[in-house]
């Protein structure tokens, strides 16, 4: 089944403790992207990647890192999480190398930072 | 950068009525306009999209219209059903910055039986 898989689904952590949210897609998609969803603010893009080893900042990149060492994986790294990063996170992929095609979303990761 | 505004933020209709959600965008280079539906506790899923060379697209009860001159596009749902209740997001992509996608803030649609 074609899908985007995120792990974990739920994560509670403390301020300053490094964490990684994994994202993997099995559709051989070129484009991958991370979003955070907060009430009333829609989906805001954190980072995106248009190809392996190519990553770029979205609208809210502060406090996050990503890597794209292989096509299928696009982990989101929070080196020193803070409470304002408490949010619902979605990974997505699409078949083209840009944002000009439908996004396939993972099931989301709900992160709480205390 | 691109800015997408979506209205209204909440919309309540009676079953069988029509619902219209509107979005405006700022970057005239944007050329791809998808709509996503997000049911409670689930991921967003594409329901319809339109490209800038088309003025209207329809899929059963759902249609999207695009006015490139005015830089706005709209989602139309006819004969609404309770299962249409969800949050709907518009987005604009394929703009000056090819990799960025900008979403509206979402519209919570409630269809009352």
Image (cartoon, coloured by chain):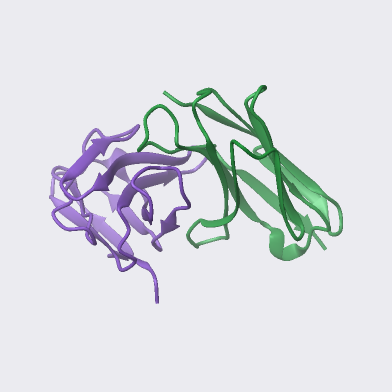
Chain colours: A purple, B green
Horizontal side of A56 relative to A39 (left or right) equals left
Q: Which of the 4 image quadrants contains residue B7? A: top right
Q: Which of the 4 image quadrants contains residue A20? A: bottom left
Residue A72 sits above or below residue B95 on the image: below
Image location (x, y in percent) of residue B33: 56, 41
The residue at the far bottom in this view is A1
Horizontal side of B38 relative to A83 (left or right) equals right
Q: Nearer the viewer, residue A89 or B53?
A: B53
The residue positioned 45% from the left and 43% from the top of the image is A100
The residue positioned 35% from the left and 38% from the top of the image is B99
Of the 4 image quadrants, the one containing the N terminus of chain B is: top left
Image location (x, y in percent) of residue B100: 38, 36
Horizontal side of B91 relative to B65 (left or right) equals left
Image location (x, y in percent) of residue B49: 59, 48
What is the tally of numbered marks visible in this picture? 0
Residue A95 sits above or below residue B32 on the image: below
The residue positioned 38% from the left and 68% from the top of the image is A3
The residue positioned 24% from the left and 33% from the top of the image is A62
Q: Nearer the viewer, residue A62 or A71?
A: A71
Q: Which of the 4 image quadrants contains residue B74? A: top right
Of the 4 image quadrants, the one containing the C terminus of chain B is: bottom right
Horizontal side of B49 relative to B18 (left or right) equals left
Image location (x, y in percent) of residue A45: 37, 40
Residue A20 sits above or below residue A81 on the image: below
């Amino acid at each position: 089944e074609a899908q985007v898989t995120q792990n974990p689904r739920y994560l509670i952590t403390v301020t300053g403790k490094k964490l990684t949210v994994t994202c993997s897609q099995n559709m051989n998609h070129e484009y991958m992207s991370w979003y955070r969803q907060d009430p009333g603010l829609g989906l805001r893009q954190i980072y995106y990647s248009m190809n392996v080893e190519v990553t770029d900042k979205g609208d809210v990149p502060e406090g996050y890192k990503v890597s794209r060492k292989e096509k299928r994986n696009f982990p989101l790294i929070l080196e020193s999480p803070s409470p304002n990063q408490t949010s619902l996170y979605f990974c997505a992929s699409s078949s083209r190398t840009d944002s000009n095609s439908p996004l396939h979303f993972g099931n989301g990761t709900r992160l709480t930072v205390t | 950068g691109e800015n997408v505004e979506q209205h209204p933020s909440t919309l309540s209709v009676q079953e069988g009525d029509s619902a219209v959600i509107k979005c405006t965008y700022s970057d005239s280079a944007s050329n791809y306009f998808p709509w996503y539906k997000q049911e409670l506790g689930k991921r967003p899923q594409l329901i319809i999209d339109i490209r800038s060379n088309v003025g209207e697209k329809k899929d059963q009860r759902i249609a999207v219209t695009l006015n490139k001159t005015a830089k706005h596009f709209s989602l139309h749902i006819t004969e609404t059903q309770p299962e249409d209740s969800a949050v709907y997001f518009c987005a604009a992509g394929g703009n000056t910055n090819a990799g960025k996608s900008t979403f509206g803030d979402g519209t919570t649609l409630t269809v009352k039986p």
